[in-house]
């Protein structure tokens, strides 16, 4: 549904998470910036949804964990219901 759309953007050290009219930017040393859409622009704000900040951090922490542990192996994007069962030894 359109209300669940989101985007992830990143460069070398900056991570962004966009959902609806809000954007959270995560920078090194736990720096967090929040922006709200105003027309066609995003304007920095001191207010914002703290839950969205936690959500952004969680998404990037999970991605980091998967990458560091070599778990990004599903290149085919097979829907879960069509994947073969994992072996018992894994």
Image: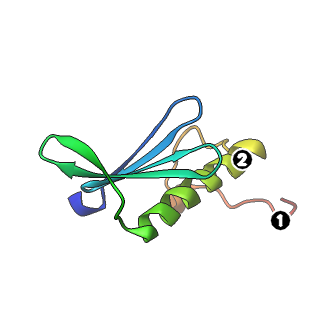
* Residue labelled with disc 1: 88
x%, y% of residue 70? 76, 42
Q: Nearer the viewer, mark 2 or mark 1?
A: 2
Which image quadrant: the C terminus? bottom right
Q: Is residue 47 visible?
A: yes
Asked which secondary structure carries label 1, the reply is: loop
Residue plotted at (59% across, 34% down) = 13
The image quarter in which residue 51 lies: bottom left
> Marks 2/1: CA distance?
17 Å
Q: In the rendered image, which quarter contains the N terminus?
A: bottom left
Q: Percent position (x, y) of residue 54?
A: 52, 65
Nearer the N terminus, badge 2 or badge 1? 2
Residue in the image at 63% along x and 55% along y = 62
2 sits to left or right of 74 = left
Q: How is the image coloured?
A: rainbow
Residue 80 horizontal/vertical position (percent): 54, 59
* Residue 70 visible in this rendered orientation of the protein: no
Residue that label 2 marks: 71
What is the secondary structure assignment of the residue under circle 2? loop
């Amino acid at each position: 549904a359109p209300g669940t759309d989101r985007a992830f953007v990143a460069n070398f050290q900056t991570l962004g998470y966009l959902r609806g009219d809000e954007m959270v930017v995560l920078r090194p040393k736990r720096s967090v910036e929040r922006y709200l859409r105003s027309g066609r622009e995003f304007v920095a704000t001191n207010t914002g949804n703290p839950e969205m900040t936690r959500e952004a951090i969680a998404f990037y922490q999970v991605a980091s964990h998967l990458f560091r542990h070599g778990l990004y192996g599903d290149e085919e994007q097979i829907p879960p219901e069509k994947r073969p069962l994992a072996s018992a030894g894994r």
